[in-house]
Image (tube, rainbow, N blue to C red):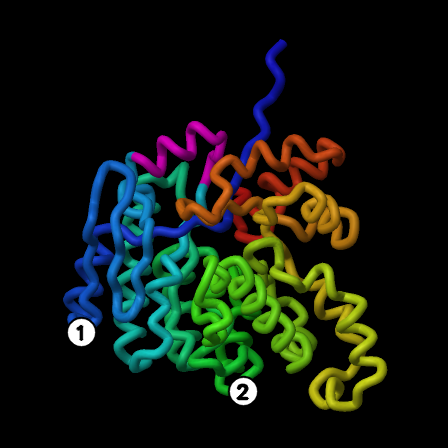
């Protein structure tokens, strides 16, 4: 008798297809959005001051995406915008337009491949009210399951009071939120060895999540469903330091009434650690109920065969299923 295939839902998969690129060119021509050096595997993305190399073809070529999914036993991808298109440094009204365009493009992809794709929204995070409005539109009109957000807005942390309308709306709608770094702390110490990614991205996620905790956002909105990309950055492994700091430092307490541990334990984490020991640590210390499959498709710092990584872990079969698809089904309301 053939064993039942375990399903897999990847909640961390980016898209920036040709209709989105054309939309950016029309709405924000000054960004000079274009692809150069294109071959059968990749291109070089130019958008504003950002150059992304390599920019894999799978991010814009749906046939490659579906082929990669099949080869790696991924049943469903939850699409999110490429972080290079956050554009939080631009005017909020313009980014409200680019976000709507990106969301409509993602919704069209989902409509074309309804059994393989879902999507979470782009929002203009530099304006809490506009972001809340776009999230509501995306979830109620376009059928999306939540949103992706960055870790800061022009070096402003996520506990800024201007974002309160967004957190309230996300909690009301039961939105799934994927936090993803992009605007890394500017420092010349990251200029070599790709440190801006290796060190900067996990550090950005840590600052973003910690600001939500110590700023009291997670305490005020206990039903927020926030998943930290890249296995949570440094957050999961510094719980003791955060807890001890809150105990001994008065400057850690102004906006947080109780120990930060309760708030930190409300976060979810994707599986993208590149280290079995770290993934085991997440399961052992935060339980499988707080871990979701994530690949960071299609970038070179991702893990396209993420289902295989989960399946080889020394955890129960139920825990594997919980991580591979059950958590995503529940948190993104995908049961049907």
Category of crowding for the residue at label 1, using alpha-carbon neighbours closer than 10 angstroms: few (below 14), some (14–19), many (at least 20): few
The percent coordinates of residue 3 (x first, y second) are 62, 17
What residue is shown at x 29% (from left), y 35% (from top)? 63
Q: Quadrant of the N terminus?
A: top right
**Residue, disc 1:** 30
Residue 156 is left or right of residue 106, and the answer is right
Quadrant for residue 247, please give it: bottom right
Residue 147 seen: no
- Say whether disc 2 or disc 1 marks the residue closer to the N-terminus: 1
What residue is shown at x 30% (from left), y 61% (from top)? 51
Name above or below for residue 3 compared with residue 329. Answer: above
- Magenta stretch: give its range: 64-76
Which label is found at residue 161? 2
Category of crowding for the residue at label 2, using alpha-carbon neighbours closer than 10 angstroms: few (below 14), some (14–19), many (at least 20): few
The percent coordinates of residue 322 (x first, y second) are 66, 41
Q: Nearer the viewer, residue 48 or 91?
A: 48
Name above or below for residue 132 compared with residue 70. Answer: below
Quadrant for residue 138, please give it: bottom left
- For the stretch drawn in magenta, what is the main secondary structure? helix
**75 part of magenta stretch:** yes
């Amino acid at each position: 008798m053939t064993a039942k295939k375990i399903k897999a839902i990847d909640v961390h998969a980016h898209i920036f297809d040709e209709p989105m690129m054309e939309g950016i060119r029309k709405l924000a021509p000054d960004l000079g959005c274009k692809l150069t050096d294109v071959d059968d595997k990749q291109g070089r993305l130019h958008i504003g001051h950002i150059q992304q190399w390599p920019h894999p073809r799978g991010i814009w070529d749906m046939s490659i995406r579906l082929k990669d999914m099949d080869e790696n036993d991924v049943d469903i991808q939850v699409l999110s915008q490429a972080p290079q298109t956050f554009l939080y440094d631009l005017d909020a009204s313009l980014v409200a337009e680019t976000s709507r365009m990106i969301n409509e493009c993602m919704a069209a992809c989902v409509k074309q491949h309804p059994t393989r794709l879902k999507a979470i929204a782009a929002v203009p995070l530099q304006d809490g009210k506009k972001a809340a409005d776009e999230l509501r539109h995306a979830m109620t009109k376009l059928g999306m399951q939540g949103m992706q957000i960055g870790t800061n807005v022009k070096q402003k942390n996520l506990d800024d009071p201007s974002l309160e309308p967004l957190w309230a709306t996300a909690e009301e709608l039961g939105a799934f939120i994927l936090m993803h770094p992009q605007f890394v702390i500017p420092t010349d110490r990251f200029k070599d060895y790709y440190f801006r990614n290796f060190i900067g991205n996990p550090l950005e996620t840590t600052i973003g999540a910690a600001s939500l905790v110590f700023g009291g956002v997670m305490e005020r909105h206990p039903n927020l469903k926030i998943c930290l990309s890249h296995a949570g950055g440094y957050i999961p492994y510094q719980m003791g330091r955060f807890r001890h700091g809150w105990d001994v430092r008065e400057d850690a307490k102004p906006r947080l009434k109780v120990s930060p541990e309760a708030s930190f334990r409300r976060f979810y984490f994707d599986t993208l650690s590149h280290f079995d020991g770290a993934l085991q640590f997440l399961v052992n210390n935060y339980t499988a109920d707080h871990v979701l499959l994530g690949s960071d498709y299609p970038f070179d710092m991702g893990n396209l065969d993420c289902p295989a990584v989960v399946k080889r872990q020394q955890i129960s079969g139920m825990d594997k299923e919980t991580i591979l698809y059950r958590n995503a089904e529940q948190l993104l309301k995908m049961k049907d």
